[in-house]
Image (tube, grey):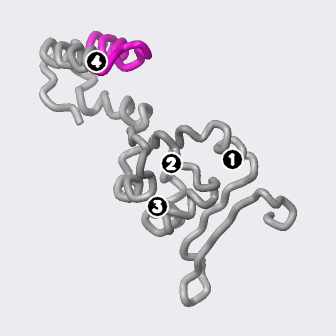
Amino acid sequence: MAINRPVFFFDYEVHSDGSLSKAILVDGIARRNYSVFGDGVSFDPTYSTNKYGIWPSHFSPGRFLVAMGGKESKYIITDQDPGILKVVPLVFKIACHRYCMWHIMNKVPSKYGVTRKDYSEFLKKMNAIIWDENIEAAEFDAKWEEIGREHTVNNID
């Protein structure tokens, strides 16, 4: 691919037996989009940690920055994969790390208890503050505390 597409980036390492150990593959469209819109990156470990051993725990994480022209993102969105959590602060020195909202919201029913009679009301109130793009941090914290007291939420993590 690199021969036919000069903007394609790849790097890899092999084990002593010649089998693939580490790899990063980035197509030209992704590299171009990152150069223009690269203020945020979302890493999904589904195909990158234990399954293929690519990102992050088994790859030199700095290669991502090389692939992207040395430009660091302003924020990184991940799930709670332990390997990614260890590597993000090593690679991204200025980026703000946040968890993926899909993963957070997917855990709400099991953490809060979908069988609770106030679940629908709790979810409605929680969504109102979570998805409010104009809410300030202090206001969010105050409303979250209020919802927690009202719905007896002690510790949802």
Discs 4/2, front: 4
Quadrant of the drawing holding the N terminus: bottom right
Magenta segment: 121-137
- Tell me which amino acid carries mark 3: Pro
The residues tagged by marks 4 and 2 sit, at their Cα atoms, a distance apart of 27 Å
Q: Assign a secondary structure to mark 1.
A: helix
The structure residue drawn at horizontal position 87% and vertical position 62%, both measured from the top left corner, is 4
Place of residue 142 in the rendered image (x, y in percent of width and height, measured from the top left): 20, 15
- Tell me which amino acid carries mark 4: Phe
The residues tagged by marks 2 and 1 sit, at their Cα atoms, a distance apart of 15 Å
The structure residue drawn at horizontal position 46% and vertical position 43%, both measured from the top left corner, is 76
* Camera-side residue of 47 and 134: 134
The structure residue drawn at horizontal position 45% and vertical position 63%, both measured from the top left corner, is 50
Circle 1 crowding by C-alpha within 10 Å: few under 14, some 14–19, many from 20: some
Image position of 96 (left or right of 150): right
**Which is more N-terminal, label 1 or label 2?**
1
Image position of 126 (left or right of 47): left
Q: Assign a secondary structure to mark 2.
A: loop
Discs 2/1, front: 1
Place of residue 84 in the rendered image (x, y in percent of width and height, measured from the top left): 41, 55
